[in-house]
Image: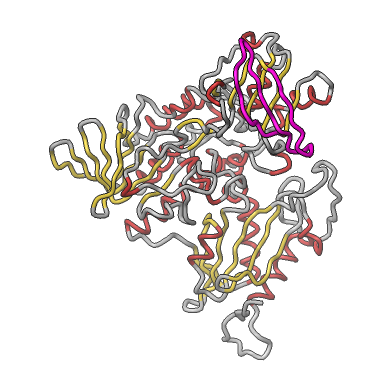
């Protein structure tokens, strides 16, 4: 750090926000000996969780009793811990509840920052960010901070408010009362069908006369999508009530407008699954539970980031960097642009691994440190063993399924295989596009269009592994930017992929066929590099 006087400070990295994402990237930068500073507007870390979720129950799992002794594997079901080397700083030591309280997460985050002595300036609100001559300039009250690299870990900036005439009459999730008794005998319209809407409905279900959840599209369930941000099973009571004729309901409709008449609210709606049928409904209370959006007000025009198509999160490249502002990166829930509604980048259990990777990429760019990797011989047997060890052990590949991958580059110059761990697959394809042969290893689900996800017809033979429905390993062979072959390994109930016939033999045969030199080549020949099909 450099202090220039007159309240000016210069760092290589500035992080804005000390929630879980800001603390996690702070930890990795500090461990690397980097020059960084984290600015936090509140007096303590994790301020979002002082207010949310409103009914004080997280949807992030805390499976304490796993039967596993290895902490790496246990992280697969610990969705709240940050990655670190201190055995005592794991969330299950703070709560034994399967769906824990956010108050326990707040205690955990405060201890994490204090125990690691992370360089966080609390009670320092950022007023404005600009970019001058390639340097980020961050303005606070009375002080200016400059940095080569800016990492935004601010989380959600405020509520997402849909464009509905009269929406200002609805009470937002951020302001609504949480005492169920306040809704006794009331007819309640909840706008939205995500977890915050179902959380709210479940809390008032035993008191309200009628609860309707409304949005244009049907409910997206987590057990169908495999995405933890979609509606979770613990909120099923409202759905039971819907089909048990209690008059509570889930409406697929466009809310055309809202207005007030006396002490009641009127909602004019058009059903989206009923051939345009319209209706006029009446309620005592209207609640808005339509999620959150990023706040871009801090940014000057010189560094205002583009947003993803939904307009609520930043548009980022494969390296987590803004698509239009060089040196501007995003941490925490703002990293979800590349796997939106897919893997877990919106949540601690996902973005903690993204941030470990981001720290490596930043060290390579700004610290000129080579991206860490292992060297392996060009040997199908050893490559098979290495890949199976990774999918049976890694919590990163498990949590960030279909997004993070291991990469195995067949390097013709060295005659070795270069193994890189935990890179986004699209980043890997960009980075290694000049190579005529490399492999990516991920965990993937089956197709997403099963009629009933609890009654799937299975075909448990290795030659039909590509029809597996549960999470299972997939190895892809790439030539430059084109995928030239793909090998699925059979799903397994306990997620153990070591069976000699089901897993080892098919993978070894696949790798052997891709690595083998032509039959007429001399013994010293390089591995055969196929042309894209």
Up/down of 130 relative to 503, above or below: above
Direction from residue 501 to residue 313 in the image, left or right: left
| Viewport quadrant of the C terminus | bottom right
Give the color scheme: rainbow, by chain, secondary structure or one colour. secondary structure
Tell whether position 499 is magenta. Answer: no
Which residue: 54% across, 51% down? 338
| Viewport quadrant of the N terminus | top left
Q: Quadrant of residue 366?
A: bottom left
Up/down of 397 relative to 293, above or below: below
Magenta segment boundaries in residue numbering: 253-282
Dominant SS of magenta comes to: strand
| Image location (x, y in percent) of residue 230 | 65, 37
| Image location (x, y in percent) of residue 165 | 57, 29
| Image location (x, y in percent) of residue 298 | 35, 38
Number of numbered tags placed on the structure image: 0
Tell whether position 261 is magenta. Answer: yes
| Image location (x, y in percent) of residue 221 | 71, 37
């Amino acid at each position: 750090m450099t202090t220039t006087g007159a309240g000016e400070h210069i760092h290589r990295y500035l992080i804005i926000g000390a929630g879980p994402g800001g603390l996690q990237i702070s930890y990795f930068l500090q461990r690397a000996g980097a020059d960084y500073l984290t600015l936090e507007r509140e007096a303590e870390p994790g301020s979002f969780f002082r207010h949310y979720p409103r009914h004080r129950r997280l949807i992030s799992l805390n499976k304490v009793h796993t039967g596993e002794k290895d902490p790496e594997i246990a992280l697969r079901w610990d969705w709240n811990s940050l990655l670190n080397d201190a055995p005592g700083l794991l969330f299950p030591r703070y709560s034994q509840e399967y769906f824990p309280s956010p108050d326990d997460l707040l205690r955990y985050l405060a201890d994490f920052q204090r125990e690691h002595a992370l360089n966080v300036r609390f009670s320092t609100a950022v007023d404005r960010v600009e970019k001058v001559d390639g340097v980020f300039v961050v303005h606070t009250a009375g002080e200016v901070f400059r940095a080569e690299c800016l990492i935004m870990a601010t989380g959600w900036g405020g509520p997402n408010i849909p464009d509905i005439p009269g929406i200002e009459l609805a009470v937002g999730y951020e302001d609504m009362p949480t005492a169920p008794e306040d809704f006794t005998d009331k007819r309640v319209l909840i706008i939205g069908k995500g977890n915050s809407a179902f959380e709210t409905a479940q809390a008032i279900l035993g008191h309200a006369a009628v609860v309707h959840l409304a949005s244009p599209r049907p409910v997206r369930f987590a057990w169908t999508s495999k995405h933890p941000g979609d509606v979770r099973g613990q909120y099923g009571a409202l759905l039971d009530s819907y089909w048990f004729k209690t008059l509570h309901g889930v409406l697929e409709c466009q809310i055309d407008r809202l207005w007030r008449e006396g002490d009641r609210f009127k909602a004019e709606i058009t059903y989206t699954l009923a051939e345009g049928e319209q209706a006029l409904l009446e309620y005592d209370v209207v609640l808005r539970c339509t999620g959150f959006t990023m706040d871009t007000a801090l940014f000057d025009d010189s560094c205002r980031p583009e947003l993803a198509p939904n307009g609520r999160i930043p548009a980022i490249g494969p390296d987590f960097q803004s698509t239009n502002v060089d040196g501007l990166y995003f941490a925490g829930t703002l990293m979800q642009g590349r796997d939106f509604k897919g893997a877990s980048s919106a949540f601690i259990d996902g973005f903690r691994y993204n941030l470990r990777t981001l720290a490596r990429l930043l060290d390579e760019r700004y610290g000129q440190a080579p991206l860490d990797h292992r060297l392996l011989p060009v040997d199908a047997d050893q490559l098979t063993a290495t890949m199976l060890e990774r999918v049976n052990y890694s919590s990163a590949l498990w949590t960030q399924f279909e997004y993070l991958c291991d990469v195995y580059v067949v390097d013709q110059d060295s005659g070795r295989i270069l193994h890189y761990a935990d890179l986004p697959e699209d980043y890997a394809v960009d980075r290694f596009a000049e190579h005529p042969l490399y492999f990516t290893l991920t965990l993937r689900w089956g197709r997403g269009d099963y009629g009933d996800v609890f009654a799937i017809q299975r075909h448990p033979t290795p030659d039909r592994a590509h029809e597996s429905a549960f999470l299972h390993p997939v190895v892809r062979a790439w030539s430059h930017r084109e995928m030239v072959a793909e090998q699925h390994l059979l799903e397994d109930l306990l997620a153990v992929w070591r069976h000699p016939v089901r897993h080892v033999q098919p993978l070894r045969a696949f790798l052997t066929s891709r690595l083998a030199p032509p039959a007429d080549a001399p013994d010293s020949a390089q591995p055969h590099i196929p042309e894209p099909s």
